[in-house]
Image: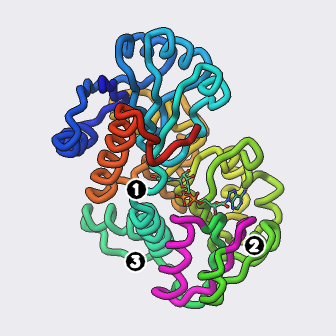
Amino acid sequence: MRVAVFSTKPYDRRFFQAANLQHGHEVEYFETRLGKKSALLAKGFSAVCVFVNDRLDGPTLEVLATGGVQTIALRCAGYNNVDLEVARRLGMQVVNVPAYSPEAVAEFTVGLILSLDRHIHRAWMRVRENNFSLVGLTGRNLIGRTVGVVGTGRIGGHVARILKLGFGCRVLASDAFPDPALMALGIDYLDFPDLLAQSDILTLHCPLTPDNRHLVDEDAIAAAKPGLMLINTSRGGLIDSAALIKGLKSRKLGGVALDVYEDERDLFFEDLSNEIVQDDVFQRLLTFPNVLVTGHQAFLTEEALTAIAETTLKNLTAIEAGEAPPHVVA
Ligand code: NAI
């Protein structure tokens, strides 16, 4: 199958080329992001392969369909960037990689909690300048702390297990579909407001949907336990960034670690170190000593990249053979 891969980085190419030895698809790699204009590049291809910040809105899908593209292969789990209704109307099949390595994201989440809580990122900067003062680096033990996990699917469930079994945290959760295996470990499910009120640390692992955009807004922060540490490795749109800044300035929030940001599309995955970043909200967030931001890298392990490439190519091979692909979104 002729496949146009958008938003390609060197690591994507490396793992796709290795996995494609078994599939033999005709793959062309484009560094540019997919949008209405760049969709013209996909003319003559049967499929496009895209990532989290490619924009597959109605107009983009129309251009793709006119150019002959019939398949959208997401090399990620989330599909909030695709207008599924339009894709359905255009007869396009949308496939994804629902679980490439939940452990990669879960382990990174725990890494963020530890780094933020114990100021490891700040300590590293100090030591590099031969500043060995410990003033301001006092942290808290994780054992016995209450962690609220929002969404206990593949990633959230693993985070809950690591924190409960590995660190001895009191783990609480909210999810409309409680996991009996987690309940058997002594993890209690609460409504979101109760979870907010009881958690010392709140970590988000639910998908972004129209219903839960800005799940963490000014009201939620007001209802949270004072000093709440908030972690988001899910989707940026779950948090109202302006409310976050207010919560940090008032010290209601004790710390924030983000691997995702609601307007990350114009920032993440690119080297902007020589640019003037125009996003004042994002720049303000970076100024707080108790905010740690990474650029959507929680998934980035060798195991995850291998699984992403293999699953994506398996989806395409099945479609080419006229079979049902293993992971259909729509
Ligand atoms: P999953 O589908 O296995 O689990 C999601 C869980 O969230 C489900 O149990 C669902 O019932 C629950 N849920 C849905 N809406 C909710 C709400 N409003 N409140 C509480 N729970 C809710 O998904 P998985 O694989 O665990 O991934 C979770 C999210 O992580 C993805 O949707 C994606 O946005 C994000 N992600 C981030 C990555 C990164 O590199 N930072 C990489 C991969 C995924």
Q: Give the range drawn in magenta.
A: 153-178
Residue 134, labelled with which disc? Answer: 3
Q: In which quarter of the image is residue 193?
A: bottom right
Specify the amino acid type for callout 3: Leu
Among the two numbered marks 1 and 3 on one chain, the one whose residue lies closer to the N terminus: 1
Find numbered disc 1 in the image and state the secondary structure of the residue it sits on. loop
Q: Is any part of residue 286 visible from this angle?
A: no
> Where does residue 174 sit, x and y in percent of width and height?
72, 69
Closer to the camera: disc 1 or disc 3? Answer: 1
* Residue assigned mark 1: 100
Q: Is mark 1 within 8 Å of ligand 1?
A: yes
Residue at image point 57% right, 57% down: 232
Among the two numbered marks 2 and 1 on one chain, the one whose residue lies closer to the N terminus: 1
Q: Is mark 3 within 8 Å of ligand 1?
A: no
Specify the amino acid type for callout 2: Leu
Q: Does the residue labelled 2 lie within 8 Å of ligand 1?
A: no
Which quarter of the image is occupied by the N terminus?
top left
> Disc 3 to disc 2, how far (Cα)?
33 Å
* Camera-nearest residue between 60 and 21: 21
Find numbered disc 2 in the image and state the secondary structure of the residue it sits on. helix
Specify the amino acid type for callout 1: Tyr
* Camera-nearest residue between 301 and 41: 41
> Disc 2 to disc 1, how far (Cα)?
28 Å
Closer to the camera: disc 3 or disc 2? Answer: 2
Cβ atoms under marks 3 and 2 closer than 8 Å: no
* Residue assigned mark 2: 195
